[in-house]
Image (cartoon, rainbow, N blue to C red):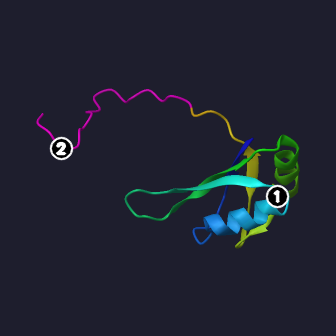
Amino acid sequence: MKLYVGNLSFESTENDLQDLFESHGTVDEVNLMMDRMTGRSRGFAFVTMNDNAQAEAAKNALNGRDLNGRALTVNEARPREERPRPQGARQSYAGGRR
């Protein structure tokens, strides 16, 4: 089960999340989302746990829990929705000719 973890402080690391969630079961992957331009955390992450019961226990125990001064939001991750491109938006290509 993949969990969404929101309201993270910019100081929170993947290791912080790994340690926190491992107290509730085996963590397969932690993916802290970073801003490409600034290199800073975007304030949310995804934590994947193989065992659904452990993931559910982690979600229930950690939702609202304080980490680095912020109350975490922990939910089951939803599939990413396709967003329509704004009208007039130009698609840019790296390299090559236009």
Which residue sits at x=83%, y=41%? 52
User: Dividing the image into 4 quarters, which one contains the N terminus?
Assistant: top right
Q: Nearer the viewer, residue 67 or 88?
A: 67
What is the secondary structure assignment of the residue under circle 1?
helix
**Closer to the camera, 13 or 70?**
13
Badge 2: how crowded within 10 Å, few (<14), some, or many (20+)?
few
Q: Main secondary structure of the magenta part?
A: loop
Q: In this view, does 92 lie above or below 33?
A: above
Q: In which quarter of the image is residue 89?
A: top left
**Mark positioned earlier in the residue sequence (1 or 2):** 1
Q: Nearer the viewer, mark 1 or mark 2?
A: 2
Residue at (77, 65) in percent of width and height? 20
Tell me the residue at 85%/45% (across/down): 56
Identify the residue shown where x is 86% and y is 49%. 54
The disc at residue 95 is 2
Question: Within the magenta stretch, is there residue 93?
Answer: yes
The boundaries of the magenta stretch are 81-98
Residue that mark 1 sits on = 62
Circle 1 Cα neighbour tier, 10 Å, few/some/many (<14 / 14–19 / ≥20): many
Image-based side of 62 in relation to 44, left or right: right
Quarter holding residue 45: bottom right
Q: In which quarter of the image is residue 8?
A: bottom right
Q: Which amino acid does label 1 sit on?
A: Leu
Q: Give coordinates of residue 97: x percent, y percent.
A: 11, 36
- Residue 3 vertical position relative to residue 23 in the rendered view, above or below: above
Q: In this view, does 86 lie above or below 74?
A: above
Amino acid under label 2?
Gly
Q: What element carries label 2?
A: loop
Spatial CA span between label 1 and label 2 = 44 Å
